[in-house]
């Protein structure tokens, strides 16, 4: 039985909490009227959750909180207060409280917060699914051992020492500037100036001056000559991020600079020569922009001296644990959370399953958000941003709908055959095994059979024949037959629509294409297979368990 300790000098509050929680979900409530007796109970009884009045006669609640934390950092503490001002709430959360309750107490709020705190405590007592490790500081670095990232490292190694233009292509947040910095650090210009310019963040009318500089009086507010970025990093490297956002006018001037390594400041006639290596990056389809007249084709050719494609995070999911460890260790150091031990299994699964449209930058933001929300030693699912939990629930719902749709579609096979006249080219076991030694199956034979045939009996006959022939791979053979039939039948029901087939089966479209190729399925107006199979019923069983908690006022 899980113990809850309430420390409050108000007897009515203690009685209320006890009546609301005692016996609820197996909870047992302990009471203390002052701080000293409360501390003794914590040492003797080791409660799972503590409800603490923030204003006690002998002890300030915050002082008592610090004493409790000194010898028990795991216990979640919920403050109780009659003061609902912003200052009190800020002080309570800043101290590291799990949450706080405002008087008068409400039954549902007391129960919900207590159960949430209890789940957090239980997560701390369980082995973590992911250990964070020691806190660390330091600059940003490349993290990843996946094959796509190994190719990125190889590309950096090939081009770093060469004095050619590099174009880095990748989605926002995937780490394009890190690639640029890695190139510079391994180049002959490593000890020379490096300047990064985000072309999308600077207004068009100011970008030219930012890059090329301007003369005094060139425009309103130009009170003195200003060196541009190209001039500032002479003999060094300039990184032009989001180069696809440049206007055609500035594109032309950058093109000339790349060709001639010289330029004129805005409002000036003096030719400025420079020796700058250019590394550019974009998340836009430059080729399409060229066709639409939004980007200069000759500039694209100049930038394409060497292209490094940077994979999005969803294509290197095996790197997520490494990235999580790195970002959590940095957040642990930056936020002085030396007590953090790791992530609960539920939290780790949510982080692994999310698609990360914002890539590594979004992952880093989520990590810092989670550390801020965590009040104990373990980060659990409730500490993660709400959109992660909502996205997971959407996926659960979609999977349920997909399974139900597949079940409905397969159960309505007979009526669908009658309405559409669809047939499957599948061989029967008897024909496929005729004249074959030891009951072997001729995998090149092709026969037709109707999906309305008694497939259960056919499958049983196949099993009997393979057992009689002495097969030692029957499990794999039966699974292959069932999988081939499943893919063929669902493709038939969807009219060969691979995207719809993938949705129904709950897999990726790439896996559907792989099975089409490996099973020799021909997707035409009718779906057929080049390998012999007997028709077997495929029933997708989906069980859904739902638990509801009903609570009421006592």
Image (cartoon, grey):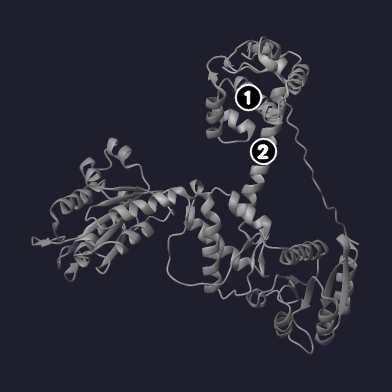
- Identify which residue is drawn at 55% across, 72% down: 135
Point out residue 192 in the picture as x, y percentages from the top left corner. Answer: 24, 68
Point out residue 428 in the picture as x, y percentages from the top left corner. Answer: 68, 13
SS at badge 2: helix
Q: Is residue 248 left or right of residue 494?
A: left
- Return the residue at label 2: 399
Q: Nearer the viewer, residue 297 or 219?
A: 297
The CA distance from mark 1 to mark 2 is 21 Å
Res 392 visible: yes
- Return the residue at label 1: 484
The relative height of residue 294 versus residue 49 in the rendered view (above or below) is above
For mark 2, does the 10 Å Cα neighbourhood hold few (<14), some (14 to 19), or many (20 or more) residues? some
Point out residue 155 in the picture as x, y percentages from the top left corner. Answer: 34, 51
Quarter of image, res 212:
bottom left
Quarter of image, res 274:
bottom left
- Identify which residue is drawn at 63% across, 76% down: 94
The relative height of residue 296 versus residue 388 in the rendered view (above or below) is above
SS at badge 1: helix
Q: Is residue 376 left or right of residue 194?
A: right
- Identify which residue is drawn at 67% across, 62% down: 128
Q: Is residue 338 left or right of residue 81?
A: left
For mark 1, does the 10 Å Cα neighbourhood hold few (<14), some (14 to 19), or many (20 or more) residues? many
């Amino acid at each position: 039985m899980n113990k809850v300790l309430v420390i409050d000098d108000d007897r009515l509050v203690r009685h209320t909490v006890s009546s609301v929680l005692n016996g609820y979900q197996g909870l047992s409530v302990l009471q203390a009227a002052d701080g000293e007796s409360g501390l003794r109970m914590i040492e003797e009884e080791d409660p799972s959750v503590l409800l603490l009045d923030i204003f006690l006669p002998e002890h300030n609640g915050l002082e008592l909180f610090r004493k409790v934390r000194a010898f028990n950092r795991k216990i979640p503490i919920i403050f109780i207060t009659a003061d609902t001002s912003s200052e009190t709430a800020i002080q309570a959360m800043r101290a590291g409280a799990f949450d706080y309750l405002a008087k008068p107490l409400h039954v549902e709020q007391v129960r919900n917060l207590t159960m949430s705190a209890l789940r957090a405590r239980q997560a701390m007592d369980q082995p973590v699914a992911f250990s964070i490790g020691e806190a660390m500081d330091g600059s940003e670095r490349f993290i990843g051992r996946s094959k796509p990232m190994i190719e990125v490292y190889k590309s950096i190694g090939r081009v770093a020492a060469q004095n050619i233009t590099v174009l880095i292509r990748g989605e926002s947040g995937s780490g394009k500037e890190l690639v640029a910095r890695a190139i510079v650090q391994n180049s002959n210009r490593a000890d020379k100036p490096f300047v990064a310019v985000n072309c999308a963040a600077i207004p068009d009318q100011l970008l030219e001056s930012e890059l090329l500089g301007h003369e005094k009086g060139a425009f309103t507010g130009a009170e003195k000559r200003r060196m541009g970025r190209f001039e500032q990093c002479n003999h060094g490297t300039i990184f032009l991020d989001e180069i696809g956002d440049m206007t055609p006018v500035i594109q032309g001037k950058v093109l000339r600079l790349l060709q001639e390594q010289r330029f004129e400041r805005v409002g000036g006639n003096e030719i400025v020569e420079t020796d700058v290596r250019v590394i550019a990056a974009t998340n836009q389809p430059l080729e399409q922009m060229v066709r639409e007249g939004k980007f200069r084709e000759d500039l694209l050719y100049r930038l394409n001296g060497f292209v490094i494609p940077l994979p999005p995070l969803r294509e290197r999911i095996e790197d997520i644990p490494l990235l999580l460890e790195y970002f959590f260790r940095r957040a642990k150091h930056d936020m002085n959370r030396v007590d953090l031990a790791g992530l609960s299994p539920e939290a780790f699964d949510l982080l692994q399953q999310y698609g990360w449209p914002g890539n590594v930058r979004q992952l880093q933001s989520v990590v810092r958000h989670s550390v801020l929300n965590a009040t104990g030693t373990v980060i659990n699912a409730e500490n993660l941003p709400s959109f992660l939990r909502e996205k997971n629930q959407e996926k659960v719902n979609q999977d349920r709908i997909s399974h139900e749709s597949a079940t409905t579609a397969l159960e309505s096979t007979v009526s669908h055959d009658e309405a559409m006249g669809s047939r499957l080219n599948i061989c029967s076991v008897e024909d496929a095994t005729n004249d074959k030694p030891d009951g072997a199956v001729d995998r090149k034979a092709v026969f037709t059979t109707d999906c309305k045939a008694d497939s259960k009996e056919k499958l049983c006959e196949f099993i009997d024949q393979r057992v009689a022939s002495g097969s030692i791979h029957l499990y794999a053979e039966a699974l292959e037959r069932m999988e081939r039939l499943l893919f063929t039948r669902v493709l038939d029901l969807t009219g060969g629509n691979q995207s719809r087939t993938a949705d129904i089966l709950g897999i990726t479209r790439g896996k559907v294409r792989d099975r089409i190729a490996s099973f020799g399925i021909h997707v035409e107006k009718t779906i057929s297979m080049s390998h012999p199979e007997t028709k077997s019923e495929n029933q997708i069983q989906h069980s859904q368990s739902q638990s509801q908690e009903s609570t009421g006022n006592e």
